Amino acid sequence: MDVRPQLTVVVPAFNESRRLANSVPRLKWALEDERLCADSIEFIVVDDGSTDGTAIRAEELLAEKFPLLRVLRIHDNAGKGAAIRVGTAAATAPVVIYMDADMAADPNQIPKLAHAIGPADIAIGSRAHSESVVVSSTVQRKVMGRTFNAMVGALTNMPFRDTQCGFKALRTPLARLLFHFARVDRFAFDVDLLTTARRLGMNITEVGIHWREVDGSTVRSLVEPISMAKDVLGVARRRRWPHVPALEVVPASGERRRSRSRIWEELYSCLGPNFPILAPSEDATLVLLPLCEPLEVHDIATHIRHLPTRLRTTERSVSFSEMTELSPFEWLPFWDGGLAVAARTDLRTDVLATPVGKWPSAAGASERSNGHRRPRPHTNGKVSSTYAGATRQRGGYGVEQSA
């Protein structure tokens, strides 16, 4: 029986074999407290070029408790942002959460963060939130965090006081779109994502969390802040973005008229795990396919042509400026998942955001919104993704998967 997960949790890991042994029990306690349902969570660990057996250790520690566990391996260390991009590209649930391997953010709060998706497109855990509980004894880390966020605010005009907390939830199709545009692969990648999200009119909410400092941080106190500052400056000055691959879909000549909802149902049945973003117009539907390589786009076009409704597909690309015209994006509940639909179209329907999965109520959880509701993988490494016996090239990273 094919089980469709309700939530994907992505954990980037670089030489985390020892810390995983200490942090995984916190996940197991959340399961025992029935705050998490392992059968509905797709757990993806991305081993970012580790040399200490992180991937093997992750399988040993998590396989028994998480039946939907997947472990991906990047051949060479590419950076935290790159690792999360790989996990997001592989996600099959409508919402993706990423969190650090040290589990500094309490795993019991995964339902709380997931529940915030619905009213918001992105929910970010914030240690600076008034209702957060933070346990940290390192003055240097506090000073670094406050200084960095002050710099981010000055350069990007973002209102968030904690962009770097490694505990965030995003709608999967929008997460793929953001990672498609992202060009920062290391510790400042969050700034790149959030800046782009605001440009595209996505609704971002900050959520109070429980967080405790864990020894063994991979942030080098002298080198990384300088690198992060350069990356933030690059994000603030950025003027060029890659195009997004897309398919323009129209009924074939002579095809009897089908309702838009019927065409969408057929597209969803064909592309559900890819969670495309749709931009409908009067005569056509534009299917946006971020993080897809040309061969994948061609294969998807072939599948669409074999749907019951005869559809013609034309491959094209969409620029960032065109994306800003299509944004913001609304969420249509659809079967066991949903579709992200460009709002600036001739769409005429009531769009209702629904809670994701069977999570406990987040009543009493305090959230702060930015009030902003306006309108590729790249490395020198080679990528292969192995799944269900098939191997294909993906996105420029050397990736292997074991189940």
Image (spheres, rainbow, N blue to C red):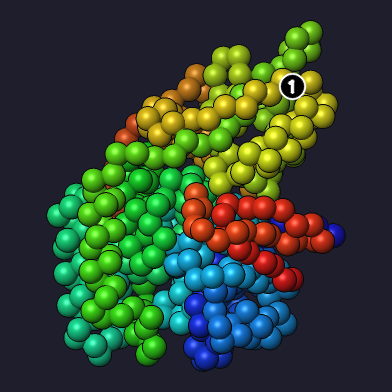
Residue placed under numbered mark 1 in the picture: 311
- Under tag 1, what secondary structure? strand
Residue 234 visible in the picture: yes
Q: Position of residue 292 (x, y in %)?
A: 60, 44
Q: Residue at x 28, y 86 (%)?
A: 136
Residue placed most toward the observer, 161 or 14: 14
Q: Residue at x 18, y 56 (%)?
A: 153
Q: Residue at x 16, y 63 (%)?
A: 150
Q: Locate residue 32: give its quadrant.
A: bottom right
Q: Position of residue 230 (x, y in %)?
A: 24, 60
Residue placed most toward the observer, 71 or 277: 71
**Residue 137 position (above or below residue 247):** below
**Residue 310 position (above or below residue 227):** above
Q: How many marks?
A: 1
Specify the farthest residue to the top: 254
Q: Residues within 10 Å of mark 1 (few under 14, many from 20)?
A: some
Residue placed most toward the observer, 278 or 382: 382
